Image: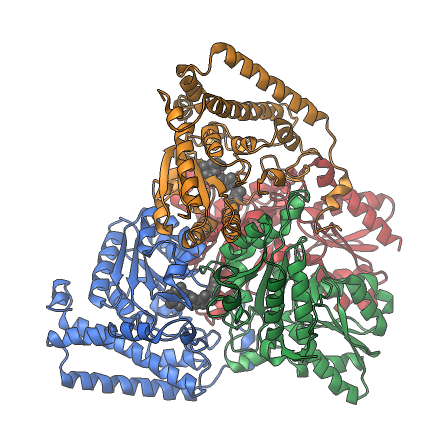
Chain colours: A green, B red, C orange, D blue
Amino acid sequence: MPVMSYIQAVTSALREEMQRDEKVFVLGEDVGRKGGVFKATEGLYNEFGEYRVLDTPLAESAIAGVGIGAAMYGMRPVAEMQFADFIMPAVNQIISEAARIRYRSNNDWDCPIVIRAPYGGGVHGALYHSQSVEAIFANQPGLKIVMPSTPYDVKGLLKAAIRDNDPVLFFEHKRAYRLLKGEVPEEDYVLPIGKADVKREGSDITVITYGLCVHFALQAAEKLAEEGIDAHILDLRTIYPLDKEAIIEAAKKTGKVLLVTEDNKEGSIIGEVAAIIAENCLFDLDAPVQRLAGPDVPSMPYAPTMEKFFMMNPDKIEKAMRELAEF
Amino acid sequence: MPVMSYIQAVTSALREEMQRDEKVFVLGEDVGRKGGVFKATEGLYNEFGEYRVLDTPLAESAIAGVGIGAAMYGMRPVAEMQFADFIMPAVNQIISEAARIRYRSNNDWDCPIVIRAPYGGGVHGALYHSQSVEAIFANQPGLKIVMPSTPYDVKGLLKAAIRDNDPVLFFEHKRAYRLLKGEVPEEDYVLPIGKADVKREGSDITVITYGLCVHFALQAAEKLAEEGIDAHILDLRTIYPLDKEAIIEAAKKTGKVLLVTEDNKEGSIIGEVAAIIAENCLFDLDAPVQRLAGPDVPSMPYAPTMEKFFMMNPDKIEKAMRELAEF
Amino acid sequence: MTGNRHEELGLSNNQVLEMYKTMLLARKLDERMWLLNRAGKIPFVISCQGQEAAQVGAAFALDRNEDYVAPYYRDMGVVLAFGMTAKELMLSAFAKAEDPNSGGRQMPSHFGQKKNRILTGSSPVTTQVPHAVGVALAAKMENKNLVSFVTLGEGSSNQGDFHEGLNFAGVHKLPVITMVENNKYAISVPAEKQLGNQKVSDRALGYGMPGFTVDGNDPLEIYRVVKEARDRALNGEGPTLIEAVSYRLTAHSSDDDDRSYRDREEVEEAKKLDSIFTFAEYLKNANILTEDLETEITNEINILVNEATDYAENAPYAEPEDALKYVYEEK
Amino acid sequence: MTGNRHEELGLSNNQVLEMYKTMLLARKLDERMWLLNRAGKIPFVISCQGQEAAQVGAAFALDRNEDYVAPYYRDMGVVLAFGMTAKELMLSAFAKAEDPNSGGRQMPSHFGQKKNRILTGSSPVTTQVPHAVGVALAAKMENKNLVSFVTLGEGSSNQGDFHEGLNFAGVHKLPVITMVENNKYAISVPAEKQLGNQKVSDRALGYGMPGFTVDGNDPLEIYRVVKEARDRALNGEGPTLIEAVSYRLTAHSSDDDDRSYRDREEVEEAKKLDSIFTFAEYLKNANILTEDLETEITNEINILVNEATDYAENAPYAEPEDALKYVYEEK
Ligand SMILES: Cc1ncc(C[n+]2csc(CCOP(=O)(O)OP(=O)(O)O)c2C)c(N)n1
Ligand SMILES: Cc1ncc(C[n+]2csc(CCOP(=O)(O)OP(=O)(O)O)c2C)c(N)n1
Ligand SMILES: [Mg+2]
Ligand SMILES: [Mg+2]
């Protein structure tokens, strides 16, 4: 199987879906001629032309809203928000419109749009180029939110998102873009939205996380394996709506659960994961549910000292895992 | 003590703060001549004039953004969003700006703005005049979110919000406006933002909730008292950042916890409450944490059958309380 | 309104009569809804009254078999012209399961009907503008011979989505027609306190499109301007902004009392220009509407409104658990 | 640029020299930052190059002791004129604790300094427009003799906040001056693909305010137009929209490579109009800038830039735990 980077998986999913279905098109800021500020759409403008890889004016509410209109018409827009942090002007279109179109029209209309956005920190991006914004949306029935952790998952889930008949937010970790590489099949495949995935089988403690933190957790698990601590790692993949069964199963498996997110702690989506466990696994737990997250400050500062203090990393996870194992 | 309605408490807090401090002013749609669509600002236009009770153009991002600019200058704006549902166009200003001004400027600037908005259902308001929107914001350090449940709390907390030197979202339940009446002191008083409040002492089960649901829970508790079930009821009052100590104390008190919200279940703020309990009270619990919430559909439909199906009420809470007590 | 202006526009006597009937039906349905509301039978009404001429004049200038519309809550005239029936509108007013707009989920006047290419709308104002632009973009990409048509109030034209949507359409010369129905008020706030500039149509310049301010009480003038806009759009000349100026004859909605913020005289003055009467006048002068015909039409419409009301009143609500349906695609 | 245009504007020789020095300092600081970036010493630069004339010309037309500014990330010329020092700017570029803008929390060019009435800015574009309007509203309410001044790029003028903010200012005739720095690109997207209409200033009409498109390479012309706008504002005549047209001489930022989307010839052409040279030329023709003086100024600025760099490079970062401070007021 060919090996590709996380961002190559994005590009190749887009290319193949655009080849497969003429209705699929990309729109966003600098996605056309420049191929995107991260190069996620590189080459597509030349291959598919201006209108299928559309450079839009600098206006996120229009990017989402025009995409929504096109989706209602029957197109399959894939809108890019240049950074997840800049999705905020589009919140009204996403929450009031995309998420509610099927429901409010009693199934008459639908809105098959994908909104991609690079999120996450550790890239000297400071407050407004480092954020995890999923918690803002992870309470809106009608939306699906996917946050993949490997090139394989990126490709299979982005294809699934494009073929899905409901709106999907697709958050890609910008530090993962070039950091993570992995095997990706040549053939067309899709992965199920709404299903978590066990990334490591283990019996001592359970770690539940998503996005780049999966990678960090796996690194930490390898280290701890040397100490004889065997971690079970569940990758949520879809963070809204959550795969409750998989969460319950993973929690019950070891009875000791660590939840990890790069986001701030209070109000992050791992709170909901903890709640699901608290509701369903009380008598299976051997230790209180643990949460490891960023501090409750607005976002990651720019200065390297403070950025590192905020940003999640394998060491922080390893420490929390060891403590839980020793509980 | 005089008795006033929930909305009269809003008006009287505004009036007194405007009398106390010239920098306090109100802005929003229809707040001036008309006195607001719910009449929350009735009489203020005549008393304070056009510029201190300003009818703005129909543009929520400007209402928030102009308010933020005025707050940075040194004014104390109280912005009204006509319905909480229509706060969405202002999300960028609230999250990217108001919440981050102190932090990003390293304490050089601050942003003492209050944003009031009527939320909640049971008023034949359908999808877009019934929503609970707090979960969208309850993950943003820098913001405070207050959701009072009684006229007394409304007045004391709204005054505190206006005097607070950080941005506060103040959500008022629109059905509570005329439904709830209560005693309110004549003298000036403020209540602490960030502190939950025990609304009923009890020993069998703990109910933790906020807003109009506190009222429903108290009604349910009175009924259950006749059956000998003694409920402890904690009113969160500030739903972000949460009063963790009070939550832990209330949970430990009875070991059986029911969390109630009118919002959808998944991703609502009671998930965070459950997580706090799961982290801190595992060995004090006699039953799994229970959550009672709206179904995971976008919002309340208009037709009375479906609205009732969605909307929280005392019967639903009573039933859940009884089940928990019997666990 | 004199002479045979409609013939100059290429409209037959039958067509203008059809326009008039549609306007009158909208008015009569609207009036009935107020009665039903005041009788406690339906919880909410928001009116088209005073804006029927603009709505129907515009709709008749469109291709009602191909074009897409993204109407706002007052556009009963538009949706009637696009094929929604009196019965369907009443089902929506009564929030009954059979309501094609939303199955009783949304408030009345939150229009949407796929088979008639009426995009589903919401309450937050102006979000429909980018949607219509998106339809126009799709039509351009697919080389379709159609336009999209979107309306909103003058207050709503101050939302960011207006700016972002129209500029997008201007850059890509998309076949979308935006009609601002300036009824002089946004709830209680008069246009002077909403708009930095008197004419909304002056905003067109900033987006590189033509802009027109038109008498919204004159369905023929609206027809002409929309028709020309449509021709330009199909010609690849891009979007148009039209401002239709009339007056909101009712309170903002059944929840509003407008006496606190506007004079009765002002309302009475505006009523003199009410298109339901002035257009009838025109048709009479042109010998198209006779007294007999008027009685016949009124009777027909009365029957229609009565039947729609009875049907809707007796129709069932959705089951409580139906609230759980259609959050996501159900396969 | 010939003659003694500055005198006609009431500017002394000293004042125009001061303008020139400020422009040059901005340019030299900016150039140094690129060197530091390419040497791996600072992670990010975003430039003022090509826009100094507009920034400094505008700032000098304001009351730098009373007015408020809400600059955008390219406005090094504005903040220097408003009192931020070279050292402070370098502290920000190096993300050091002493940086007055943010204590090293924000990327460079995210300006803010309360003592100089520079509002704190963020990355999402155009949010500062309503803030400046809010300051102007406050100034009007408090009867203060001051204006607020806000800038943004032409791409950013397509955000909803531009529309909502300017319309608000238009309705209430607020003392706010908006200057769009049209440098022809928004990252890779040229102005034709951003703007439905060629001139941003044409948008002014829709908000009921005067609009002007000005040569952004001519600091005196900018000075004149901003000065007049300020006079109108203080006179109660309300806001003004100004478009300053120049060219972005560098790539968008240190993370961008502009060769993929614009021709080298185009950039070379633009460099011929670079205000740093053309304004020097003007000052030489007017016998204000002699060769000796030029050398002196260059030396002075070099020293300033060197000192600022050294100081900032050696200054300490904030402590890791400082990340926890100032989420809320700390009493
Ligand atoms: C984003 C948003 N904010 C506020 C409201 C509440 N609201 C409903 S209609 C209305 C006034 C609309 O005025 P205008 O656009 O002039 O339309 P009109 O009702 O006069 O036809 C307001 C403020 C809303 N629906 N959406
Ligand atoms: C809301 C938002 N969307 C996207 C971005 C990313 N971004 C930063 S600068 C920029 C282009 C700005 O262009 P323009 O307004 O013309 O200003 P210029 O950089 O040319 O001075 C973009 C797209 C952003 N900062 N904010
Ligand atoms: Mg109106
Ligand atoms: Mg630019």
Give the vertical position of C197 relative to D55 (above or below): above
> Would you say residue B277 is visible in this rendering?
no
Q: Report x, y in % for residue C128.
A: 52, 46
**Would residue D89 appear left or right of B145 to someone viewing this image?**
left
Quadrant of the picture in which ligand 4 is shown: bottom left
Give the tally of numbered discs. Answer: 0
Q: In the displayed image of the protein, which residue is found farthest to the right?
A: B326
Q: Quadrant of residue C85?
A: top right
Q: From the image, which quarter does the N terminus of chain D lie in?
A: bottom left
The residue closer to the viewer here, D276 or C212, is C212
Residue drawn at (73%, 40%), measured in percent from left and top?
B306
* Residue displayed at 55% across by 73% down: A300
Residue B290, image quadrant: bottom right
- Residue found 62% across the figure and 75% down from its top: A6
| Residue B23 place in picture, x, y as percent | 41, 53
- The percent position of residue B40, horizontal first and vertical second, equals 53, 41
Q: Position of residue A52 (x, y in %)?
A: 52, 60
- Depth check, front residue: C194 or D192: D192
The answer to whether residue C24 is above or below residue C173 is above
* Residue C315 shows up from this direction: yes
Residue A301, relative to residue D40: is it above or below? above
